[in-house]
Image (cartoon, grey):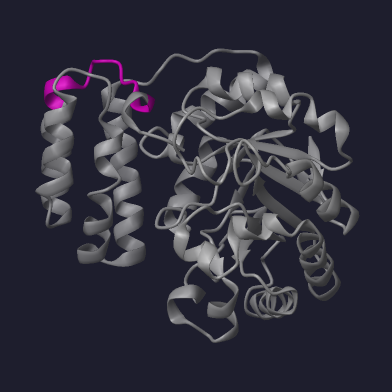
Amino acid sequence: MWRIGDISIDGRVALGPMSGFTFPSYRDFMKPFGVAVSFTEMTSCMGVIHDSERTASMYLDFKGNRPIGLQLFGGDPDSLAEASVKAMRMNPGIDFIDVNMGCPVPKVLRSRSGSALMEDPARCGEIVKAVKRRAGIPVTVKTRLGRSMESLNFREVLDHVISAGADAVTLHARTVKEGYSGTPHFDMAESLQSEISVPLIISGNIFSLDDAVSAVRTTGAKGVMVARGGIGNPYLVTQIDAWFREGRRLPDPTVSDQIRWCRELSDAVIAEKGEEVGVRKLRSIAPKFVSGCRMCNAYRRILATEPETREDLFRILDMIEERMGHQKAHAACAHGED
Protein backbone atom coordinates (compact mmCIF):
# COMPACT_ATOMS: atom_id res chain seq x y z
CA MET A 1 0.00 0.00 0.00
CA TRP A 2 1.25 3.48 -0.87
CA ARG A 3 -0.34 6.89 -1.20
CA ILE A 4 -0.81 9.76 -3.62
CA GLY A 5 -1.44 12.54 -1.14
CA ASP A 6 -4.32 11.25 0.99
CA ILE A 7 -5.33 8.59 -1.56
CA SER A 8 -4.46 4.98 -0.71
CA ILE A 9 -3.15 2.94 -3.64
CA ASP A 10 -3.57 -0.81 -3.16
CA GLY A 11 -1.29 -2.42 -5.74
CA ARG A 12 1.65 -1.63 -7.97
CA VAL A 13 0.13 -1.23 -11.42
CA ALA A 14 -0.80 2.18 -12.81
CA LEU A 15 -2.71 2.27 -16.09
CA GLY A 16 -0.90 4.87 -18.16
CA PRO A 17 -2.50 7.71 -20.13
CA MET A 18 -2.70 6.88 -23.85
CA SER A 19 -4.31 9.14 -26.42
CA GLY A 20 -7.01 7.24 -28.24
CA PHE A 21 -6.99 4.30 -25.84
CA THR A 22 -7.62 5.13 -22.18
CA PHE A 23 -11.23 6.18 -22.75
CA PRO A 24 -13.79 5.12 -20.11
CA SER A 25 -14.72 1.68 -21.44
CA TYR A 26 -11.06 0.70 -21.82
CA ARG A 27 -10.22 1.87 -18.28
CA ASP A 28 -13.23 0.01 -16.87
CA PHE A 29 -12.23 -3.14 -18.75
CA MET A 30 -8.66 -3.05 -17.42
CA LYS A 31 -9.53 -2.33 -13.78
CA PRO A 32 -10.51 -5.89 -12.70
CA PHE A 33 -7.22 -7.30 -14.00
CA GLY A 34 -5.43 -5.56 -11.14
CA VAL A 35 -5.04 -1.89 -12.01
CA ALA A 36 -4.47 0.04 -8.78
CA VAL A 37 -4.68 3.57 -10.18
CA SER A 38 -5.66 4.93 -13.60
CA PHE A 39 -4.96 8.02 -15.67
CA THR A 40 -7.18 9.56 -18.33
CA GLU A 41 -6.07 10.30 -21.85
CA MET A 42 -3.86 13.38 -22.09
CA THR A 43 -6.35 16.25 -21.99
CA SER A 44 -5.87 19.81 -23.22
CA CYS A 45 -6.30 22.41 -20.49
CA MET A 46 -7.57 24.85 -23.12
CA GLY A 47 -10.09 22.29 -24.30
CA VAL A 48 -11.43 22.08 -20.75
CA ILE A 49 -11.55 25.86 -20.38
CA HIS A 50 -13.35 26.37 -23.70
CA ASP A 51 -15.87 23.53 -23.19
CA SER A 52 -14.68 21.32 -26.03
CA GLU A 53 -17.14 18.44 -26.37
CA ARG A 54 -14.36 16.04 -27.35
CA THR A 55 -12.28 17.11 -24.36
CA ALA A 56 -15.20 16.72 -21.96
CA SER A 57 -15.63 13.09 -23.05
CA MET A 58 -12.15 12.38 -21.67
CA TYR A 59 -12.87 13.28 -18.07
CA LEU A 60 -16.61 13.21 -17.33
CA ASP A 61 -17.34 9.48 -17.07
CA PHE A 62 -15.43 7.75 -14.25
CA LYS A 63 -18.20 5.51 -12.84
CA GLY A 64 -16.71 3.42 -10.02
CA ASN A 65 -13.26 3.17 -11.57
CA ARG A 66 -11.20 4.95 -8.94
CA PRO A 67 -8.75 6.21 -7.93
CA ILE A 68 -8.20 8.04 -11.20
CA GLY A 69 -6.24 11.10 -12.20
CA LEU A 70 -7.09 13.61 -14.91
CA GLN A 71 -3.96 14.17 -16.98
CA LEU A 72 -3.74 17.73 -18.31
CA PHE A 73 -1.29 19.31 -20.69
CA GLY A 74 -0.58 22.99 -21.15
CA GLY A 75 2.20 25.48 -20.66
CA ASP A 76 0.68 28.20 -18.50
CA PRO A 77 0.32 27.77 -14.71
CA ASP A 78 -2.88 29.84 -14.49
CA SER A 79 -4.55 28.04 -17.41
CA LEU A 80 -3.72 24.63 -15.98
CA ALA A 81 -5.05 25.71 -12.59
CA GLU A 82 -8.25 27.10 -14.13
CA ALA A 83 -8.79 23.92 -16.14
CA SER A 84 -8.30 21.81 -13.01
CA VAL A 85 -10.95 23.74 -11.09
CA LYS A 86 -13.42 23.64 -13.98
CA ALA A 87 -12.92 19.91 -14.58
CA MET A 88 -13.45 19.17 -10.89
CA ARG A 89 -16.64 21.21 -10.90
CA MET A 90 -17.89 19.14 -13.85
CA ASN A 91 -16.72 15.85 -12.34
CA PRO A 92 -16.20 15.73 -8.56
CA GLY A 93 -14.97 12.15 -9.01
CA ILE A 94 -11.54 13.34 -10.15
CA ASP A 95 -9.16 12.09 -7.45
CA PHE A 96 -6.03 13.96 -8.51
CA ILE A 97 -4.58 16.09 -11.29
CA ASP A 98 -1.62 14.79 -13.29
CA VAL A 99 0.37 17.36 -15.27
CA ASN A 100 2.05 16.06 -18.41
CA MET A 101 5.65 17.26 -18.61
CA GLY A 102 6.89 14.39 -20.75
CA CYS A 103 4.98 14.16 -24.04
CA PRO A 104 7.48 14.28 -26.95
CA VAL A 105 4.94 14.77 -29.76
CA PRO A 106 5.96 17.76 -31.95
CA LYS A 107 2.47 19.30 -31.92
CA VAL A 108 2.52 19.40 -28.12
CA LEU A 109 6.10 20.70 -28.02
CA ARG A 110 5.19 23.59 -30.32
CA SER A 111 2.64 24.75 -27.75
CA ARG A 112 5.40 24.82 -25.11
CA SER A 113 3.64 21.99 -23.30
CA GLY A 114 4.54 18.40 -22.48
CA SER A 115 8.26 17.73 -22.37
CA ALA A 116 9.02 21.29 -23.55
CA LEU A 117 8.38 22.29 -19.93
CA MET A 118 11.54 20.43 -18.90
CA GLU A 119 13.58 23.25 -20.42
CA ASP A 120 12.42 25.44 -17.52
CA PRO A 121 12.38 23.41 -14.27
CA ALA A 122 11.38 26.45 -12.22
CA ARG A 123 8.25 26.85 -14.37
CA CYS A 124 7.45 23.19 -13.75
CA GLY A 125 7.41 23.99 -10.05
CA GLU A 126 5.23 27.06 -10.62
CA ILE A 127 2.69 24.93 -12.47
CA VAL A 128 2.44 22.40 -9.65
CA LYS A 129 2.11 25.16 -7.07
CA ALA A 130 -0.65 26.93 -9.03
CA VAL A 131 -2.66 23.77 -9.72
CA LYS A 132 -2.36 22.51 -6.16
CA ARG A 133 -3.38 25.88 -4.69
CA ARG A 134 -6.50 26.16 -6.86
CA ALA A 135 -7.54 22.51 -7.12
CA GLY A 136 -7.13 21.50 -3.51
CA ILE A 137 -6.55 17.85 -4.41
CA PRO A 138 -3.32 15.87 -4.93
CA VAL A 139 -1.19 16.84 -7.93
CA THR A 140 1.22 14.54 -9.75
CA VAL A 141 3.63 15.00 -12.64
CA LYS A 142 4.78 12.78 -15.51
CA THR A 143 8.15 13.61 -17.03
CA ARG A 144 11.19 12.15 -18.83
CA LEU A 145 14.93 11.90 -18.32
CA GLY A 146 15.65 15.09 -20.26
CA ARG A 147 15.80 16.50 -23.77
CA SER A 148 18.59 14.12 -24.81
CA MET A 149 21.28 11.93 -23.29
CA GLU A 150 23.47 15.03 -23.29
CA SER A 151 20.97 17.00 -21.20
CA LEU A 152 19.57 14.79 -18.47
CA ASN A 153 17.88 17.20 -16.08
CA PHE A 154 15.11 15.05 -14.59
CA ARG A 155 16.53 15.36 -11.08
CA GLU A 156 16.34 19.14 -11.30
CA VAL A 157 12.77 18.96 -12.59
CA LEU A 158 11.81 16.56 -9.81
CA ASP A 159 13.42 18.81 -7.20
CA HIS A 160 11.30 21.75 -8.34
CA VAL A 161 7.98 19.91 -8.62
CA ILE A 162 8.38 18.05 -5.34
CA SER A 163 9.39 21.24 -3.53
CA ALA A 164 6.26 22.85 -5.02
CA GLY A 165 4.05 20.14 -3.54
CA ALA A 166 3.79 17.31 -6.08
CA ASP A 167 2.32 14.25 -4.36
CA ALA A 168 3.85 11.66 -6.72
CA VAL A 169 5.93 11.61 -9.91
CA THR A 170 6.00 9.33 -12.93
CA LEU A 171 9.29 9.00 -14.81
CA HIS A 172 9.38 7.68 -18.36
CA ALA A 173 12.94 6.42 -18.59
CA ARG A 174 13.67 7.77 -22.06
CA THR A 175 14.66 11.18 -23.34
CA VAL A 176 12.47 13.49 -25.39
CA LYS A 177 14.70 12.89 -28.41
CA GLU A 178 14.24 9.12 -28.13
CA GLY A 179 10.46 9.41 -28.09
CA TYR A 180 9.13 5.87 -27.81
CA SER A 181 12.03 4.09 -29.50
CA GLY A 182 14.98 2.22 -28.08
CA THR A 183 15.44 0.71 -24.66
CA PRO A 184 14.50 2.70 -21.55
CA HIS A 185 17.39 3.74 -19.32
CA PHE A 186 16.18 2.56 -15.94
CA ASP A 187 19.79 2.53 -14.78
CA MET A 188 19.81 6.34 -15.04
CA ALA A 189 17.20 6.34 -12.27
CA GLU A 190 18.80 3.65 -10.13
CA SER A 191 17.51 3.82 -6.54
CA LEU A 192 15.68 7.06 -7.40
CA GLN A 193 12.82 6.27 -5.03
CA SER A 194 15.20 6.45 -2.07
CA GLU A 195 16.31 9.94 -3.17
CA ILE A 196 12.88 11.57 -3.30
CA SER A 197 10.19 12.14 -0.69
CA VAL A 198 7.13 11.18 -2.75
CA PRO A 199 6.12 7.96 -4.52
CA LEU A 200 7.75 7.19 -7.86
CA ILE A 201 5.91 5.46 -10.69
CA ILE A 202 8.31 4.10 -13.30
CA SER A 203 7.33 3.93 -16.97
CA GLY A 204 8.66 2.75 -20.32
CA ASN A 205 8.47 -0.53 -22.30
CA ILE A 206 6.61 -2.58 -19.71
CA PHE A 207 5.59 -5.46 -21.96
CA SER A 208 6.24 -8.40 -19.64
CA LEU A 209 6.43 -9.33 -15.98
CA ASP A 210 10.22 -9.37 -16.21
CA ASP A 211 10.17 -5.81 -17.59
CA ALA A 212 8.14 -4.66 -14.60
CA VAL A 213 10.25 -6.49 -12.02
CA SER A 214 13.48 -5.15 -13.50
CA ALA A 215 12.20 -1.56 -13.60
CA VAL A 216 11.00 -1.67 -9.99
CA ARG A 217 14.10 -3.43 -8.66
CA THR A 218 16.39 -0.93 -10.37
CA THR A 219 14.57 2.23 -9.33
CA GLY A 220 12.80 1.15 -6.14
CA ALA A 221 9.57 2.62 -7.54
CA LYS A 222 6.31 2.22 -5.64
CA GLY A 223 4.35 1.82 -8.86
CA VAL A 224 4.94 0.60 -12.40
CA MET A 225 3.01 2.05 -15.34
CA VAL A 226 1.52 -0.29 -17.92
CA ALA A 227 0.52 1.51 -21.10
CA ARG A 228 0.81 0.04 -24.61
CA GLY A 229 2.10 -3.23 -23.19
CA GLY A 230 -1.38 -3.87 -21.82
CA ILE A 231 -3.27 -3.27 -25.06
CA GLY A 232 -4.34 -6.72 -26.16
CA ASN A 233 -2.57 -8.25 -23.17
CA PRO A 234 -4.65 -7.27 -20.12
CA TYR A 235 -3.46 -10.33 -18.21
CA LEU A 236 -0.04 -8.69 -17.99
CA VAL A 237 -1.52 -6.49 -15.26
CA THR A 238 -2.67 -9.60 -13.38
CA GLN A 239 0.75 -11.21 -13.74
CA ILE A 240 2.50 -8.11 -12.36
CA ASP A 241 0.00 -7.75 -9.53
CA ALA A 242 0.33 -11.41 -8.50
CA TRP A 243 4.11 -11.23 -8.50
CA PHE A 244 4.35 -8.17 -6.28
CA ARG A 245 1.58 -9.29 -3.91
CA GLU A 246 2.39 -12.97 -3.57
CA GLY A 247 5.61 -13.73 -5.45
CA ARG A 248 3.65 -15.92 -7.90
CA ARG A 249 4.56 -16.17 -11.59
CA LEU A 250 1.33 -16.82 -13.47
CA PRO A 251 1.41 -18.62 -16.84
CA ASP A 252 0.58 -16.81 -20.06
CA PRO A 253 -3.06 -16.99 -21.16
CA THR A 254 -4.35 -19.15 -24.00
CA VAL A 255 -5.70 -17.79 -27.27
CA SER A 256 -9.20 -18.68 -25.98
CA ASP A 257 -8.60 -16.44 -22.97
CA GLN A 258 -7.46 -13.64 -25.24
CA ILE A 259 -10.48 -14.01 -27.52
CA ARG A 260 -12.88 -13.98 -24.55
CA TRP A 261 -11.33 -10.77 -23.23
CA CYS A 262 -11.39 -9.22 -26.69
CA ARG A 263 -15.13 -9.92 -26.93
CA GLU A 264 -15.70 -8.33 -23.50
CA LEU A 265 -13.77 -5.21 -24.42
CA SER A 266 -15.43 -5.02 -27.84
CA ASP A 267 -18.92 -5.02 -26.34
CA ALA A 268 -17.88 -2.33 -23.85
CA VAL A 269 -16.33 -0.09 -26.52
CA ILE A 270 -19.35 -0.47 -28.82
CA ALA A 271 -21.71 0.32 -25.93
CA GLU A 272 -19.76 3.51 -25.23
CA LYS A 273 -19.08 4.72 -28.75
CA GLY A 274 -21.74 3.12 -30.92
CA GLU A 275 -21.21 0.31 -33.41
CA GLU A 276 -19.69 2.25 -36.31
CA VAL A 277 -17.18 4.27 -34.30
CA GLY A 278 -16.58 1.43 -31.85
CA VAL A 279 -15.75 -1.16 -34.50
CA ARG A 280 -13.48 1.30 -36.26
CA LYS A 281 -11.62 1.85 -32.99
CA LEU A 282 -11.49 -1.90 -32.36
CA ARG A 283 -9.66 -2.46 -35.64
CA SER A 284 -6.61 -0.98 -33.91
CA ILE A 285 -7.15 -2.89 -30.66
CA ALA A 286 -8.48 -6.36 -31.52
CA PRO A 287 -5.42 -7.44 -33.58
CA LYS A 288 -3.24 -6.97 -30.52
CA PHE A 289 -5.09 -9.74 -28.70
CA VAL A 290 -3.77 -12.24 -31.26
CA SER A 291 0.01 -12.35 -31.04
CA GLY A 292 2.83 -14.82 -30.63
CA CYS A 293 1.06 -17.86 -32.02
CA ARG A 294 0.83 -19.75 -35.31
CA MET A 295 -0.79 -17.73 -38.14
CA CYS A 296 -1.16 -14.70 -35.87
CA ASN A 297 0.11 -12.24 -38.50
CA ALA A 298 -2.57 -13.27 -40.99
CA TYR A 299 -5.32 -13.08 -38.38
CA ARG A 300 -4.16 -9.68 -37.18
CA ARG A 301 -4.36 -8.34 -40.73
CA ILE A 302 -7.92 -9.63 -41.04
CA LEU A 303 -8.95 -8.05 -37.73
CA ALA A 304 -7.35 -4.75 -38.71
CA THR A 305 -9.08 -4.46 -42.09
CA GLU A 306 -12.26 -6.52 -42.44
CA PRO A 307 -14.71 -5.84 -39.58
CA GLU A 308 -17.47 -3.34 -40.37
CA THR A 309 -19.95 -4.45 -37.71
CA ARG A 310 -19.93 -6.22 -34.36
CA GLU A 311 -21.16 -9.34 -36.16
CA ASP A 312 -18.17 -9.22 -38.53
CA LEU A 313 -15.75 -8.81 -35.66
CA PHE A 314 -17.18 -11.63 -33.57
CA ARG A 315 -17.34 -13.97 -36.57
CA ILE A 316 -13.60 -13.47 -37.11
CA LEU A 317 -12.87 -13.94 -33.40
CA ASP A 318 -14.93 -17.16 -33.38
CA MET A 319 -12.95 -18.47 -36.36
CA ILE A 320 -9.63 -17.72 -34.66
CA GLU A 321 -10.71 -19.38 -31.43
CA GLU A 322 -11.96 -22.48 -33.23
CA ARG A 323 -8.64 -22.91 -35.02
CA MET A 324 -6.20 -21.82 -32.33
CA GLY A 325 -7.96 -21.57 -28.99
CA HIS A 326 -5.81 -24.15 -27.18
CA GLN A 327 -2.52 -22.44 -28.02
CA LYS A 328 -0.67 -20.26 -25.57
CA ALA A 329 -0.68 -16.56 -26.43
CA HIS A 330 2.23 -14.22 -25.88
CA ALA A 331 0.52 -10.96 -26.72
CA ALA A 332 3.43 -8.81 -25.61
CA CYS A 333 5.77 -9.87 -28.38
CA ALA A 334 4.17 -7.94 -31.23
CA HIS A 335 3.18 -4.69 -29.61
CA GLY A 336 6.01 -2.31 -30.43
CA GLU A 337 7.16 0.39 -28.03
CA ASP A 338 5.52 1.88 -24.94
Compared with residue 99, is residue 307 higher up or lower down, i.e. above or below? above
Q: Residue 327 colored magenta? A: yes
Q: Residue furthest front?
A: 150
Picture coordinates of residue 169, whole percent (x, y): 74, 46
Picture coordinates of residue 270, whole percent (x, y): 29, 59
Tell me: 59 left or right of 295: right
Q: Residue at x 70, y 19 (%)?
A: 217
Q: Write down the quadrant of residue 74 in the picture.
A: bottom right
Residue 266 seen in this snapshot: yes
105 vs 304, nearest the viewer: 105
Q: Residue at x 87, y 57 (%)?
A: 165
Residue 6 seen in this snapshot: no
Compared with residue 177, is residue 295 higher up or lower down, i.e. above or below? above
Tell me: 217 left or right of 17: right
Q: How many marks?
A: 0
Q: Write down the quadrant of residue 279 in the picture.
A: bottom left
Picture coordinates of residue 86, whole percent (x, y): 67, 81
Compared with residue 149, is residue 60 higher up or lower down, i.e. above or below? below
Q: Write down the quadrant of residue 242 in the picture.
A: top right
Q: Residue at x 32, y 27 (%)?
A: 257
Picture coordinates of residue 64, whole percent (x, y): 59, 57
Q: Residue at x 17, y 45 (%)?
A: 304
Compared with residue 166, is residue 318 higher up or lower down, i.e. above or below? above
Q: Which residues are magenta?
A: 322-332
Q: Residue furthest bottom?
A: 50
- The quadrant the N terminus occupies is top right
Q: Residue 259 colored magenta? A: no
Tell me: 185 left or right of 157: left
